[in-house]
């Protein structure tokens, strides 16, 4: 590798990227933009579920129960209905997710200790929402019942009764249990991977299409110099894009980097390096920009979305699928990102992932270099 | 005289297809060597073999003294290449393209400056430094591409159909540049499918289906492949007597060139043909010997190849 020949290649790439607003936008701003779009749209938090109540009792006790249910931010009481028949149309038009029916004589039965039955109806179409909403509601009802029992016992003067077990829960790393804290690092990996593979693959295939690749091959420039000359500018630019991404994550979702910044940069560089070399590999297969686009999309979009643990936990996948996830670099990057950004963990927690990223990147570069040499001189 | 390119039974096969079929030739230093052939005849493949872009299936070749099989890297440093497809960066300016290729060839500042001022003058690219290459007219782009190929002062320049898509005036100007290069002692290896361009070459090979079917200078080739007389017949209704002429024993071959007929006649039989024509043709006619063009040679050799294959 001769630096005298490497330098003009790097310079040339920078000039070309600067003159091409599309790749500049792609590399610098698109990551942050996608984060904003996805960050708000991909939200697994279940809050403000629309609720209807049919209160046949209209007693103090029934009003108390309803006010308990809607006191948190989980349920919004949007409809107070007079009859059960009114519930159906509301479910059909998706105006409510849950309905609670309080029977006549609720307060009387309660006082007599006859266990009145409160009916809960839930729209199970989206099982996640239904399940979460249901468990919130059951919890509220259970607490209500327990409190009633305790009060009853208290009043019967059988003695002082206390809660048998009391839990003190502290949630670490994500005290508000916001799904965005979990998703944003995943999104970073997802977006960076797609963009870096796409940008590198397109830039090389463009040279093939234009015939400039031939001109380079006829010069004393070596394939390694050509590849490194391409990698360096794209790496720097996508690293800048990654920083804008971090900035957006902090500004919009309040996700600050807790751990070591140098380590964060290290894993980002390694991950981008993996993406770059994958992009080069794609470019050695594709002969046209359309094919490169397709291949880059296929090899990044789905694997990174589905198999990296970004959304779906890897341990829940069937074993053969789990095996595939081992060759997805985003899987390792995600572990590092979550550890550094959310947990502030030290390198001990993810040094294995770092080693894998290094191996993956080097293997990909070696493979693409070999393929490049082979595809160039036949 | 020094030999710049020496090719010995060079062959390139792609699967079952033989693109270059055991060709041999030698190119003297400082000459313009032309490779004439139709598309797909094997011209570009030959150039790519000589430049080290392709590996030969068999055979040997030396370019500027270096073996293309063993010293491909050395070959790259002493050749310049310009291809049929315009292959500079359209999104770089003229000077950025020149500087980039100069640096890639390892020129230092001083060498680059002197090369640039020499080439700007020679090619007339002065004052166009900051123009984006994509905005240059085709003729200028060709000159820029040639300049990029000449930056490192190569011994041999390979031009692969360099004037495709350029207007006739720009083509003529481009050939003036090529002559200048030869005068300065550089060897120019050029492929073309333009017959008029082939006439400009010092030495010529006609290539067909991967094999050389005619060799020599344009003048030699014409003499060699036309030992008979070529006559041009101008008459009122050439189409009507075409068939009749074909049946005459004196006439070896008839072909139509516009409104005229080219007749190939064995030497010494011109007089008897003239007598027959006087009897057969109602109106005036004009029959006179002409110098065959390269097109005549080209067509004749192709027809001979076709009949040989038919046998």
Image (cartoon, grey):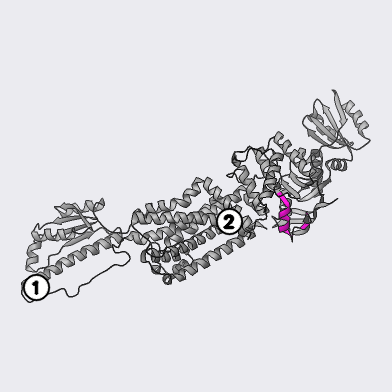
Q: Which residue is mark 1?
A: A153
**Looking at the image, how many numbered discs can be counted on the residues?**
2
SS for dot 1: helix
> Where B280 sits versus A4, above or below?
above
Crowd class of label 1 (few under 14; some 14 to 19; many from 20; radius 10 Å):
some
Residue visible at 83% across and 28% down? Answer: B234
CA gap between label 2 and label 1 equals: 79 Å
Q: Which residues are magenta?
A: B64-80
SS for dot 2: helix
Q: Nearer the viewer, mark 2 or mark 1?
A: 2
If you read the primary sequence from the N terminus, does the residue marked by circle 2 or circle 1 appear first? 1
Q: Position of residue A82 (x, y in %)?
A: 13, 52
Q: Chain of mark 2?
A: A
Choose between B80 and B8: the one closer to the eye: B80
Q: Which residue is mark 2?
A: A229
Residue B67 in magenta?
yes
Q: Position of residue A124 (x, y in %)?
A: 28, 59
Choose between A20 and B214: the one closer to the eye: A20
Crowd class of label 2 (few under 14; some 14 to 19; many from 20; radius 10 Å):
many
Residue visible at 78% across and 58% down? Answer: B60
> Where A28 sits versus A128, above or below?
above
């Amino acid at each position: 590798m001769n630096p005298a020949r490497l330098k003009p290649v790097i310079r040339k790439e920078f000039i070309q990227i600067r003159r091409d607003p599309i790749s500049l936008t792609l590399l610098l701003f698109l990551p942050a933009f996608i984060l904003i779009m996805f960050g708000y749209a991909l939200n697994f938090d279940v809050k403000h579920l629309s609720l209807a109540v049919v209160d046949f009792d209209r007693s103090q006790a029934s009003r108390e129960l309803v006010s308990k249910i809607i006191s948190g931010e989980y349920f919004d009481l949007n409809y107070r209905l007079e009859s059960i028949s009114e519930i159906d149309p509301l479910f059909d038009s998706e105006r409510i997710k849950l309905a609670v029916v309080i029977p006549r004589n609720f307060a009387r039965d309660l006082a007599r200790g006859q266990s009145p039955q409160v009916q809960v109806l839930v729209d199970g179409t989206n099982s996640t929402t239904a399940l979460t909403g249901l468990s919130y509601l059951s919890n509220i009802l259970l607490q209500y019942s327990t409190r009633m029992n305790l009060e009853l016992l208290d009043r019967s003067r059988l003695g002082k009764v206390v809660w048998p077990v009391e839990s003190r829960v502290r949630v670490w790393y994500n005290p508000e249990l916001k799904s965005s804290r979990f998703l944003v690092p995943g999104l970073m990996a997802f977006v960076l991977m797609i963009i870096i593979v796409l940008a590198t693959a397109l830039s090389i295939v463009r040279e093939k299409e234009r015939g400039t690749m031939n001109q380079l091959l006829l010069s004393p420039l070596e394939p390694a110099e050509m590849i490194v000359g391409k990698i360096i500018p794209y790496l720097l630019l996508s690293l800048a894009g990654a920083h804008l991404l971090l900035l957006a994550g902090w500004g919009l979702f309040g996700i600050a980097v807790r751990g070591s910044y140098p380590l964060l940069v290290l894993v980002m560089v390694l991950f981008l390096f993996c993406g770059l070399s994958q992009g080069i590999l794609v470019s050695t297969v594709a002969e046209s920009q359309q094919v490169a686009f397709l291949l880059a999309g296929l090899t990044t979009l789905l694997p990174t979305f589905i198999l990296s643990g970004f959304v779906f936990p890897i341990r829940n996948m069937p074993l053969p699928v789990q095996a595939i996830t081992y060759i997805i670099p985003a899987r390792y990057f995600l572990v590092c990102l979550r550890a550094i950004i959310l947990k502030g963990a030290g390198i001990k927690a993810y040094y294995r992932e770092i080693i894998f990223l290094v191996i993956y990147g080097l293997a990909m570069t070696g493979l693409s270099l070999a393929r490049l040499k082979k595809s160039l001189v036949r | 005289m020094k030999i710049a390119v020496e090719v010995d039974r060079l062959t390139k096969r792609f699967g079952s297809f033989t693109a270059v079929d055991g060709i041999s030739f030698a190119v003297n230093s400082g000459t313009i060597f032309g490779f004439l052939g139709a598309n797909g005849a094997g011209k570009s493949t030959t150039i790519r073999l000589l430049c080290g872009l392709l590996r030969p299936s068999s055979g040997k070749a030396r370019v500027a003294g270096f073996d293309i099989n063993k010293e491909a890297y050395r070959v790259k440093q002493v050749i310049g290449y310009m291809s049929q497809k315009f292959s500079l960066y359209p999104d770089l300016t003229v000077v950025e393209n020149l500087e980039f290729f100069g640096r890639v060839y390892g020129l230092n500042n001083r060498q680059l400056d002197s090369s640039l001022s020499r080439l700007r003058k020679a090619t007339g690219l002065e004052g166009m430094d900051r123009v984006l290459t994509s905005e240059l007219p085709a003729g200028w782009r060709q000159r820029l591409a040639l300049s990029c190929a000449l930056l490192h002062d190569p011994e041999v320049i390979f031009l692969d159909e360099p004037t495709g898509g350029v207007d006739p005036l720009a083509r003529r100007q481009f050939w003036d540049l090529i002559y200048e290069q030869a005068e300065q002692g550089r060897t120019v290896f050029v492929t073309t499918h333009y017959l008029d361009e082939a006439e400009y070459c010092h030495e010529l090979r006609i290539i067909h289906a991967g094999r050389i079917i005619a060799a020599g200078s344009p003048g030699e080739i014409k003499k060699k492949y036309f030992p008979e007389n070529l006559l041009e017949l101008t008459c009122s209704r050439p189409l009507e007597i075409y068939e009749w002429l074909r049946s005459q024993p004196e006439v070896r071959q008839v072909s139509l060139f516009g409104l005229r007929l080219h007749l190939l006649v064995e030497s010494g039989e011109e007089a008897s043909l003239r007598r027959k024509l006087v009897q057969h043709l109602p109106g005036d006619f004009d029959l006179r010997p002409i110098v065959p063009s390269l097109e005549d040679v080209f067509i004749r050799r192709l027809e001979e190849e076709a009949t040989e294959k038919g046998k």
